[in-house]
Image (spheres, grey):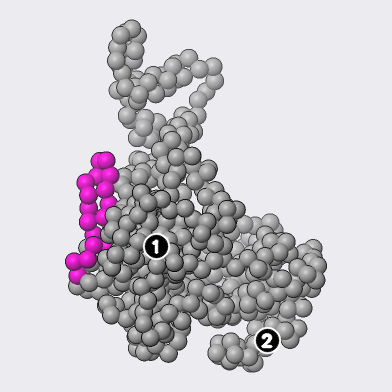
Amino acid sequence: MRKAVWILLCWMLTNVHLLAQKNAEFSPIDKVGALMYYLQTFYVDTLNENNLTEHAIEAILKELDPHSYYLTAKELKESEEPLQGNFEGIGIQFNIFHDTIMVVSPISGGPSEKVGIRSGDKIIYINDTLVAGKKITNNDVFKWLRGKKGTKVHLKIKRKNEKELLSFTIIRDKIPVFSVDAAYMAAPDIGYIKINRFSNTTMDEYHKAMNELTAMGAKHLILDLSDNSGGYLHAAVDLADEFLKSGELIVYTEGLNSNRKNYFATAKGGFHEGKLVVLINEGSASASEIVSGAIQDLDRGIIIGRRSFGKGLVQNTFPFPDGSAVRITTSRYFTPSGRFIQAPYDMGVEKYYEDLLSRFKNGELTGEKNIPFPDSLKYYTRNNRTVYGGGGIMPDLFLPMDTSYFSDFLIDLSSKNIINDFCMEYVDENREKLQQTYPSFDLFDKNFDMNKGTFQAFIDFAAKQDIKATDQEIAASAEWIKVRIKAGIAQNHWGRKEFFMVWNQNDASFKKAIEIIKGNKFPKISFFK
């Protein structure tokens, strides 16, 4: 019995005679201990005490809140890797295509790039074991290719236009996990930074991106936190600090067993004067809401998009001796105006996680008038604008989800990953042609035309995968699909930044952000008109 919960029960197991006393008083934990004693002593079969313990812990935590949960040692390690900012492996981005591991791109500066692995390479053997043409999963690939720094892995690669398989020996190393997806100039004096999570490396990545944008003439900033599910509290505080003046309250936390703790901006922030627009949506949560809530409450910038997820609970990790752990909610966080923005979870965990589907069904994502905000949750910004708590950050400017392109055809494409598969195959088959025709991304962005056979090739590709559609369905979704394919080709041939450089050209929030920043007067928008 290695887990700490068993240690807590030891006293009970050695003093079980107390239970026989008719009037003995004992705590709930003693009651659990008594149960385990009875099972160990009298149960008809052998007990798997580890499984019983884990199930018991999970059941207890489910009664608390949606964000307190148990993690095995493996799950804990996997959950921390993206937030630590690195893992140990060979350094490739990959996709599984036709039961074969295809290298989307080697990570810059990583061990695979150093030995000559290229985009489009197909991994056939790993350590002399055939892995191509088999039913494999992403977890299989992680198991084979990740490992301790300094260890070796042998690959045999199939490369286009090469008759024989190519052999590579790669020494595993620390591989960075980036939290800044893209940073580029959205307009002559407007920079754009897309952050996907708040990790230990986020601020280093942000500073590097911001320095480059400033050198290119950026005076104003679009900070894209859409679909950013959060991460470390300290990273969120540090990012908000960049935009706020010394002494301004960013966020505070407080709980029954945790005294109030205030987090203030310092003098180190580097972007105090330029116009700032923050993009959020229903996938923006936790740390994203700390940043956007502080920016909104202190009237530092404009928040554009849709209501954020609504996670206002703070967790701490408490380990067990065997490497597993529990993450327990220890406090709540509040925005500078005092808003607690955690969405209600009194109807249970399942209902809580179905909230986004409920928002879609009740029309909230397509119309702000469907969002109820009672006066009891009313708060005021520094400039006396009305904002609301009780479930996420409501943007200053609501932009509805565009559902005009929805169709059963698009749902089928998404469920089977058809667009990503087409983009990967297209780049693999046309890599040399793309390099010759578009030696730079700018030329590709300006001149690549989806209507010159590529869209029809996609329709034919989808049909071969048993995805068929009526002319009406194709017409409804065509423009969205064309942009998505062009962005996907750009990502597979150049990188993640180029994906957003294509995609954002048709994103309503992005375009509205540029329009607002370019306006003569930076507005103080109230979403209730």
Image position, residue 195 (x, y; %): 43, 69
Where does the N terminus fall, quadrant-wise? top left
Q: Which residue is mark 2?
A: 449
- On screen, 188 above or below 523? below
Residue at 36 percent of width and 82 percent of height? 521
Residue at 37 percent of width and 21 percent of height? 31
Q: Which mark is residue 486?
A: none
Furthest toward the front, the residue is 529
Image position, residue 364 (x, y; %): 54, 57
- Dominant SS type (magenta): strand
Q: Is residue 176 visible?
A: no
Type of amino acid under label 2 = Asp
Q: Which residue is mark 1?
A: 288
- On screen, 352 above or below 131? above
- What kind of element bears circle 2? loop
The segment highlighted magenta reads 246-263
Residue at 36 percent of width and 73 percent of height? 524
User: Mark 2 or 1 closer to N-term?
Assistant: 1
Q: Nearer the viewer, residue 423 or 221?
A: 221
- On screen, 492 above or below 100? below
Residue at 65 percent of width and 68 percent of height? 404
